Image (tube, rainbow, N blue to C red):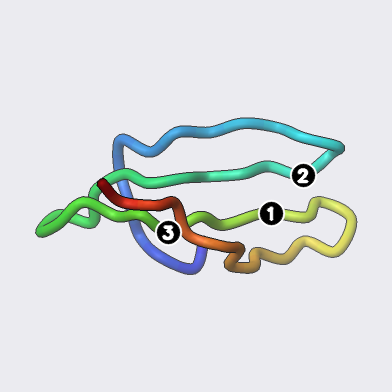
Amino acid sequence: MLSRRSSAGVAVLEGMLYVAGGNDGTSCLNSVERYNPKTNTWEGVAPMNIR
């Protein structure tokens, strides 16, 4: 992952693993990352909206 986090939401969609939100030890995160197992790479995607 690009950012260290705990308590994140995880889902698989079209063969990609998505990790959303969580906590980095000091604050709540709204960032979302995607793992591509074919290329063994992580990339950031659009963050979640905060309300």
Q: Is residue 43 left or right of residue 48?
A: right
- Residue 16 image point, x, y percent: 77, 44
Say left or right for 50 vs 2: left
Disc 1/disc 3 C-alpha distance (Å):
14 Å
Q: Nearer the viewer, mark 1 or mark 3?
A: 3
Q: CA distance from mark 3 to mark 2?
A: 16 Å
Dot 2 and dot 1 residues touching (CB under 8 Å): yes
Looking at the rendered structure, the kind of residue marked 1 is Tyr
Q: Which label's residue is closer to the chain start, 3 or 2?
A: 2
Query: Which of label 3 and label 2 is nearer to you?
Result: 3
- What residue is rendered at 65% in x and 64% in y? 42
In this rendering, the answer to whether 25 lies above or below 20 is below
* Residue displayed at 37% across by 46% down: 21
For the residue pair 41 and 34, the one nearer the viewer reads as 34
Q: Quadrant of residue 3?
A: bottom left
Q: Which residue is mark 2?
A: 16
Question: Residue 46: x percent and y percent?
Answer: 56, 62
Q: Look at 78% across and 55% down and name the residue there.
A: 36
Sequence-first disc among 2 and 1: 2
Horizontally, residue 15 falls left or right of residue 21, namely: right
Task: Give the secondary structure at mark 1.
Answer: strand
**Badge 3: few (under 14), some or many (20 or more) residues near its Cα, within 10 Å?**
some
- Dot 3 corresponds to which residue? 31
Name which residue type carries label 3. Ser
User: How far across and how far down the image is residue 6, in percent?
Assistant: 30, 43
Residue 9 is situated, as x and y percent measured from the top left of the image, at 45, 33
Q: Mark number for residue 9? A: none
Residue at horizontal 72%, vertical 66%? Answer: 41
